[in-house]
Image: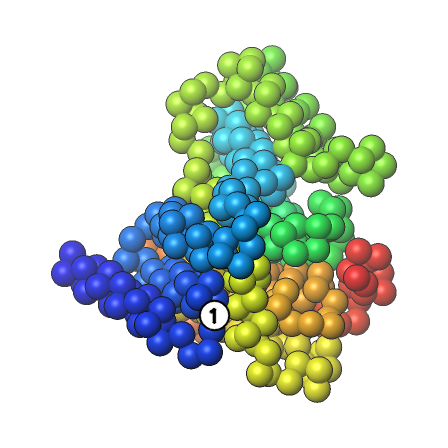
Amino acid sequence: MKRKLLIILFVAAAGVAVIAFPMGLDKAQSYAASLFVIATILWMTEAIPLYITSLLVLFLEAILLAPAMKETNPKFKYEIFMHPFFSSVISLFLGGLLLAKAGAKYKIDDYLAKSVVRFSGPRPRNILLGMMITTGFISMWMSNTAATAMMLIITMSIVSDLKESGYEKAFFLGIPFAANLGGMGTPVGTPPNAIALSAMQAFLKTPITFLDWMLASVPIVLILIMVLWIILNKMYKEPDIKIVLKQKSRMDFTPKTITVMVVFFLTVILWLTEELHHIPSGITALIPAIIYLGSGILDREDFQSIAWDVLFLVGGGASLAIAIADTGLAQKILGGIPWDQFSFAIIIIIFIIAGAFFTTFMSNTASANIILPLVFSVVGIHYVPVAVATALAISASMSLPVSTPPNALAYSSGKIQLKDMVTAGFIITVASVILIFFSAYLVWPNLIGAFSR
């Protein structure tokens, strides 16, 4: 409590100091800079919940920044800062959360996971690969934290014979890391993806489609999961034993279960074919909300229990990005950097390394809120590949327990030591950064039309 109070006092002092000593900024820019400093420190330290910081940002924008901007633009309205809190990206993410909630409630994800483990055969290394691929796939559609928690429970029941050999560590590293990587695969997989889409929507007005994102990210996810599997098998020797899953995988195909699966596949298909039917992905995301909640498949308690804090967090980051851009603060901050002297490759490297570095020590969502808005302040670059690459690099950084919730869950199991996570996490992070760079620089602009703008 004392530490939190000291941080809050420091944040308040820092915010006032930026306004008192604006260093060449006009009134609106100094207020925006103060907000940026306050939000950055609070998001980094988590002195208060991350989503509360988002609400604080909105509050300060309305009472401080909006009046300052109105002095130079009498038609300016504070509502512009509220729009990101229920934009089409938030609607998209909400739909993803409801799909995940229904899948978990009717144990479809558990059935899929156990079926894949049983299909993998008795060899530990094959089961590990099957569980990693399954975890990655599930994490594309539901919270990677929830996917990790579920898969770790299954892992506990099958690795008891692996403790002596040390190979159980491969499972307790492979599961959370695969969840981190899997979240990169779709726009609804993890908050940094939604933050990147929100930023594109705010600054470009032409965010990429669901399919565009998957075309760029899924190959990277698959390659990195295979690389991770090879790394773990190099680090830990597979014992010469066979594993048999004792608990059977079964699912009751009731009308509700069938409806859940039909709606899931319908929603995903519509997301992937947006360019054919022209229904925005954010509107398609309302289908599971209407059917699941309207039919009673999900009830009010289910609706209340989804991750609303994540939605507010994404909205707060996008709202702050608008403040930074519309006041001209971003251009002021980055204007002194000779971006025109940097090649496109160097710019990509700068942002993806910054994303990976920050996420090593703080939550990936906080990192995305801080870094991604700055991407759109660099004049004369292809914003889409840089923004997507940065978001993926943020999700791919996983060297410490604090880097991502799946890492924290695995570390809290007591089955791995910090050095295990640091070693494997650092290697896969470096591999991720290299692969993301080459994809963003060489592959995406040539193979995916939306990435050339």
Q: Would you place residue 122 above or below residue 239 in this image?
A: above
Q: Would you place residue 298 above or below residue 25 in this image?
A: above
Q: Answer with the quarter of the image where residue 229 lies.
A: bottom right
What kind of colouring is applied to the model shown? rainbow
On the image, the x and y values in percent for residue 57 come to: 40, 52
**222 or 252, nearer to the observer:** 222
Q: Is 387 left or right of 179, judged from the image as shown?
A: right
Instruction: Name the kind of residue labelled 1 in the image.
Output: Asp
On the image, the x and y values in percent for residue 324 come to: 52, 62
**272 or 154, nearer to the observer:** 272
State whether residue 25 appears in this view.
yes
On the image, the x and y values in percent for residue 23 come to: 42, 79
Other residues around mark 1 within 10 Å, as few (<14) / some (14–19) / many (≥20): some
Please tell me which residue is depicted at 82% across the width and 40% down the height of the picture.
275
State whether residue 147 appears in this view.
no
Please tell me which residue is depicted at 70% across the width and 64% down the height of the picture.
383
Q: SS at mark 1?
A: loop
| Farthest residue, direction left | 2
Please tell me which residue is depicted at 60% across the width and 50% down the height of the picture.
198
Q: Is 302 left or right of 183, judged from the image as shown?
A: left
Query: Looking at the figure, which quarter contains the N terminus?
Result: bottom left
**201 or 24, nearer to the observer:** 24
* Number of marks in picture: 1
Which residue is disc 1 drawn over?
26
Query: Looking at the figure, which quarter contains the C terminus?
Result: bottom right
Q: Would you place residue 338 above or below residue 16 in this image?
A: below
On the image, the x and y values in percent for residue 347 come to: 66, 77
Please tell me which residue is depicted at 14% across the width and 61% down the height of the picture.
2
